[in-house]
Image (cartoon, helix red, strand yellow):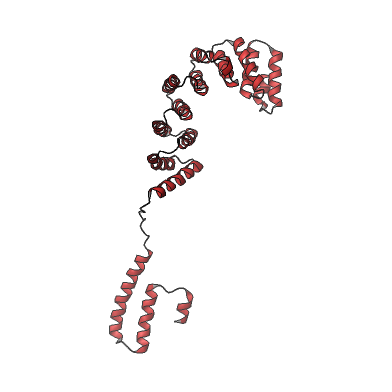
């Protein structure tokens, strides 16, 4: 008995066996009746042991409203870290009942666009119901529509937004970018042309140049690219477009200068060397 006890902790079935042996030693029972009782006890012990080893069922916790909200925020953060669209939807389903901040929908939208998820549009639409005038939500929604193959709807959405907010330069740029990507260069050029001089940023001039290049108006495009690079001299995309525009006009020395500058800034040289 000492050996059995010291090997491992006593389980229920082992305790029944030990009790039976003790009864025999003390002479308190008839052996035949003990055998019958032992069988019954053993069967009972085995049933109890099986019950102990069965997996427990999940507990349905009754959470308070604050606890539910905390749980949803934890799910949300975990979903963003893992790029888990399903978990993100689960978290937002709880959070939207408590009117979360616009930033939650914005961050979710960025994550879903990067994942190329089919859920990006429904999530952003949920955000827009709560924050219809939030600029970044509207920009992401238009971008999401374009990424999902519905550029026309994205363009229409930005036009509608700009009727209410005509002074939002970022919205104008988004509209022009959608038009350029959809090869509607003339429309994009008209949108960008109307921006007053005191609101023209480096990006405004860059997108204007892209529209003009699409219209094959290279000389005018060069003017806007040069303005862009005056403000952002290391803007690689603008440098690449300027070098190519110089090539189109057979201004080889200027093109060489631009490509050499790109190499000096650390740009990958394979394509540039071909152009050189």
**Quadrant where the C terminus lies?**
top right
Between 148 and 77, the one nearer to me in the picture:
77
Residue at 61% across, 10% down: 219
Is 141 above or below relative to 10? above
Q: Is residue 151 visible?
A: no
Residue at 68% across, 16% down: 255
Residue 233, how many percent across, how many down?
A: 67, 22
Residue 149, how many percent across, how many down?
A: 43, 25
**Quadrant in which residue 234 is drawn:** top right
**Quadrant in which residue 268 is drawn:** top right
Residue at 65% across, 21% down: 231
Residue 225, how many percent across, how many down?
A: 62, 17
**Quadrant in which residue 159 is drawn:** top left
**Quadrant where the N terminus lies?**
bottom left
Residue 184, how many percent across, how many down?
A: 48, 15
Between 272 and 142, the one nearer to me in the picture:
142
């Amino acid at each position: 008995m000492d050996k059995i006890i010291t090997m491992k902790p006593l389980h229920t079935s082992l305790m029944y066996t030990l009790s039976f042996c003790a009864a025999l030693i003390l002479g308190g029972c008839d052996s035949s009746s003990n055998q019958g009782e032992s069988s019954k006890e053993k069967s009972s012990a085995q049933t109890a042991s099986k019950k102990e080893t069965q997996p427990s069922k999940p507990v349905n916790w009754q959470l308070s409203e604050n606890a539910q909200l905390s749980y949803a925020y934890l799910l949300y953060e975990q979903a963003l870290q893992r790029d888990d669209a399903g978990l993100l939807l689960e978290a937002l389903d709880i959070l939207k009942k408590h009117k979360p901040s616009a930033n939650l929908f914005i961050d979710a939208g960025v994550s879903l666009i990067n994942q190329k998820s089919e859920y990006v549009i429904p999530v952003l639409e949920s955000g827009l119901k709560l924050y219809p005038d939030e600029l970044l939500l509207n920009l992401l929604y238009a971008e999401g529509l374009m990424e999902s193959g519905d550029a026309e709807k994205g363009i229409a959405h930005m036009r509608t937004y700009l009727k209410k907010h005509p002074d939002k330069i970022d919205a104008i740029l988004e509209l022009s970018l959608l038009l350029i990507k959809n090869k509607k260069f003339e429309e994009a050029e008209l949108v960008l042309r109307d921006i007053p001089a005191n609101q023209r940023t480096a990006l405004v001039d860059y997108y204007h140049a892209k529209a003009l290049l699409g219209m094959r108006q290279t000389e005018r495009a060069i003017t806007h690219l040069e303005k862009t690079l005056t403000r952002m001299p290391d803007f690689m995309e603008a440098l690449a477009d300027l070098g190519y525009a110089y090539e189109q006009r057979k201004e080889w020395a200027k093109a060489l200068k631009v490509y050499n500058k790109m190499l000096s800034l650390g740009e990958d040289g394979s394509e540039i060397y071909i152009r050189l």
